Amino acid sequence: MTKNILRTLVKDATAWKAADVENDSSWIYHLTPADLDEIDLAFRQVKANGQTWGEFGKEVFVLPLLAEKLRSIDDQIRNGRGFVLLKGFPVKRYTLDEIKTIYWGLGTHMGQVISHNVAGDFVAAVTDLALNSSDPNRRNNTTNQLLDPHTDLADVVSLLCIEQAQEGGMSSLVSTVAIHNEVLQHHPEYLEVLYEGFYHDYRGYGPNADPNEVTATPIPVFEYNNGRVNCAFAKKIIETGAKKRGVPLTPLQQAAIDYVHELGTREDMRVDMMLEPGDIQIINNYITLHARSNYFDHDDGRKRYLLRMWINLEDSVQLSPDFASFVRRGIPALKQVA
């Protein structure tokens, strides 16, 4: 099947670089006292109903005034630069379970919250769990180690910061559309293999729960669909996928993913932000790579602690059906054998 490869530069808002956002704060939204009162009222109603996170939809978590701000955020995510920062949620006002309930409520106004780990979690912690560092399938969001630029498995990735690290933990975002432009301009010979794609390592959370399982077909790094350049990229799982298949990457394939990774770390390409308590970062996963520097927790035992949600947008036409079948699936919970 011939790939529909875009061979012209994208010049819209999705193809931003660091200089484009340096002196522009249009991607930052602030919760007002009226917004917070409305959120609290919605939470109190849910609590009075005896409901908690995962048990209700947006029709229960009513936000008539804040809804306009959320619609603007939705438009930025779908049609703008693809990322926003919502600031000012009062994390000290609520317990952790209450925060999860409110966070879930906000998420339901964006779309369908989906599972993002084998435990079936819809609202999960991003914190250092001090797990076995020798496990090759360990999820990096459970460590304090550097996270390379990558995409996830949902339309939207949302992070709510509850506690910062003592040092480090910088969040970085890069436009994958700007990366596509750079590849086209400087290394067009990479386009073919990037559109053809790579077998991804399932890392133990594939259909068969086999720790050595890889995808049945190659997953494109780039696809061009409905006028949009979409991306699915994680250098590590491409490389371990090749290793588990026993089929090494060709020199051209390796050079192509190395270049995408390099662009994802370059200072002129990325925007860096240190998430503060009460910040909610929301990104369009298909046009944004996200990364994180390593970090060190507090000497007094306090740990960097964020909550993450994966959300699929309603009525999304951004992806082709084949591409969507992999990148919108989340990580379903493993079925328990009785």
Image (cartoon, rainbow, N blue to C red):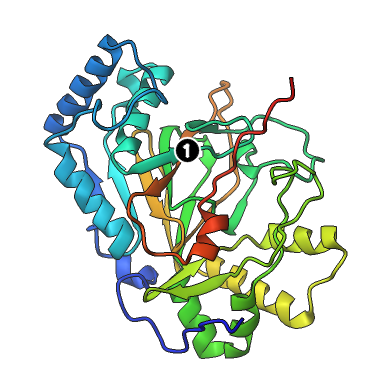
Question: Identity of the amino acid at label 1?
Answer: Arg
SS at circle 1: strand
- Residue at image location 75% in from the left, 43% down from the top: 208
Residue at horizontal 46 percent and vertical 81 percent from the top = 181
Whether residue 27 is visible to the viewer of this picture, yes or no, is no
Can you tell which quarter of the image residue 48 is in?
Answer: top left
- Camera-side residue: 104 or 236? 104
Tell me: 290 left or right of 284: right
Q: Point out residue 153 in the picture as x, y percentages from the top left corner.
A: 54, 51
Image x and y of residue 311, in percent: 42, 44
Residue at the right extreme? Answer: 246
Q: What residue does disc 1 label?
A: 308
Residue 98 at x, y percent in the picture: 36, 19
In the rendered view, would you say 181 is above or below 14?
Answer: below
* Quarter-of-image position of residue 55: top left
Is 62 or 337 nearer to us in this picture?
337
Q: Is residue 285 left or right of residue 256?
A: left
Would you identify the image quadrant in which residue 183 lies? bottom right
Residue depicted at x 74% and y 19% = 338
**Viewer-proximal residue, 87 or 115?**
115
